[in-house]
Amino acid sequence: MGNELILDINECNRPYWEALAQGSLSFQSCTRCGHNWLPSSRSCPNCLSTAWSWSKSAGRGKIVSWVVYHIAYHPAFKDRLPYNVAIIELREGPRLISNVLGDCAQLSAHADVDLVIEQEGEVHVPRFVLVGKGG
Amino acid sequence: MSGKSDSLRGKYVIAGIGQTAFGKLGQDTVSLNVAACTFALEDAGVEKDAVDALFVKTPTSSREILYGQKLAEGLGIQPRWGGAWDQGGAANISLISFAIMAIETGQCEIALVCYGDNPRSGSRDIYARPRGNDSLFGWFSTAAGYGMIHRAHMIEYGTPTEAFAAVAIAARKHGAVNPNAQLRKEISLEDYLASPMLIDPLRRDDCCLLSDGAAAVVIMSREAARKRGIDHAVPVLGMGSGQTSWELPARPTLTSTQAVQSGRLAFEMAGIKPTDVDVAQLYDCFTITPLMTLEDYGFCEKGKVADFVCDGQIEIGGRLPINTSGGLLSETGMPGLQLILEGVRQIRGTAALQVPGADVCVVSNQGGTMHTHATLVLGD
């Protein structure tokens, strides 16, 4: 305890985390208006419909913006400095906060990235690698 | 939009202003607020029992139930209207707007609007907090969100580092002349470039101060101020607000703010255009914020703000001096009410760095990670 990150995994977002554990990044798709979104919510933020389903992302996205931390706000990240946090836009539309693995100096606007799922403590998280730079 | 609101143009005034010292003060927030309110009432020459509305912005660094009532107790008053409001830094101007609407509808006559906080001697955890489950990626702090927006503006418009530096240099230049400023040290472009990268692209000198302190204003009708013989009351010519509720990743655009909306409302109510503005106090929690506000208010074309701020054009003596008391970057990190006080001083003609003959001052307030925005136009 103490250094652990506090997560809120609840009835609404649990399928997202379970899908990651099984190797896929999912998002919600509205069956009424077709809107795709993240993070999870009980109704479509576009049309308020509660008729939606989980869809699987193909895992390709692009970098919208990013920052590189040179200071750690939590002990868990002290040994990772400098590290980046990026906004990734999936091909299917939803955007999410993530990390782009590898050298922070290689990041560039609109660069294509591919999904890599990694284990982080008890959960699996979606990270990305630059297309053509991945392992 | 005009028609209804412009009938209120100049009908209400800021009749008094007050503030504490800024810096590390070691006092509780109610005491700080009470001190600022006392100075504001003295400045207006209003007895506290005449105050029938008390609007306070919730202290950012701590959350308390019924904070407005705690403050009323501290002031020993029984307000009819008021309470504590959380809208981030936009709340100051919003609360002035609510006070005006409440007086206009006959619900009250004299309102105090105030803010006090003590994150420097108390807790600054709120600014460093994890952002929900995204803490798994190291997504922490208020600053990082602004770093994302700063980078997005560079990506979309090629905004050079010098534009961000110009905001910091102007604030520090103006703050150095302000005897009440927390940080009174001018910087050069070289100093700015040498200041350490905290969350790239944010350098230390892109980031506002962390401060204890409080400020307050007294709001009443121009007619009430005239009857009371208050000769330094400053009329509110326009006010406006705008909000987005998208968190950063989901926001349709990162390079435009609700200043577009709040500015349009306030400028239309005031019947002004950007070229009528003599001086501006623009919320500067980070250097990107006033740059985007200048664009969104229409002072320059979107994406062209670098040309507008270069060569000292936003410094005293320039085309549009901004943040003439130092802003959040140099006077105090207080989220926004100090900018309103400086706007009042500019129109009164009593500012430490006075813009000669200033008739129109625009003040912007902003909250969250550019979630909320409010605009105030002050003038003679």
Image (cartoon, rainbow, N blue to C red):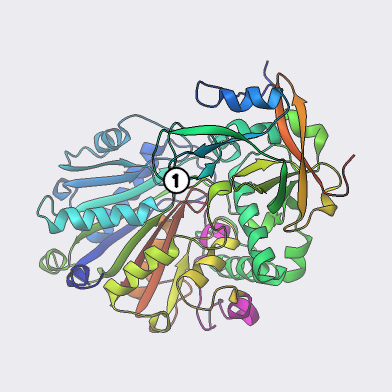
Q: Residue at x 9, y 54 (%)?
A: B106
Residue type marked 1: Cys
| Vertical side of A120 occupied by B315: above or below | below
Picture quarter with the N terminus of chain B: bottom left
Q: What stretch is highlighted in magenta?
A: B306-335
> In which quadrant of the rendered image does the C terminus of chain B lie?
bottom left
Q: How many labels does the image show?
A: 1
Instruction: Tell me where residue A101 appears, x and y as whole percent.
Output: 81, 41
Position above or below: B264 against B220:
below
Identify which residue, B239 or B217, lies in the foreground.
B239
Q: Who's the residue at 21% across and 58% down the image?
A: B100
- Local secondary structure at mark 1: loop
Judge whether B202 appears above or below A126 on screen. below
Q: Where is residue B361 in the image (x, y as percent from the top left)?
A: 38, 73
The residue singled out by tag 1 in the image is A33
Relative depth, front residue between B146 and B332: B146
Q: Can residue B323 be seen in this view?
A: no
**Protein chain holding label 1:** A
Return the residue found at the far front: A31
In the image, is B368 to the left or to the right of A6?
left
- B167 vs B71, nearest the viewer: B167
Q: Is B329 inside the magenta-drawn segment?
A: yes
A133 magenta-colored: no
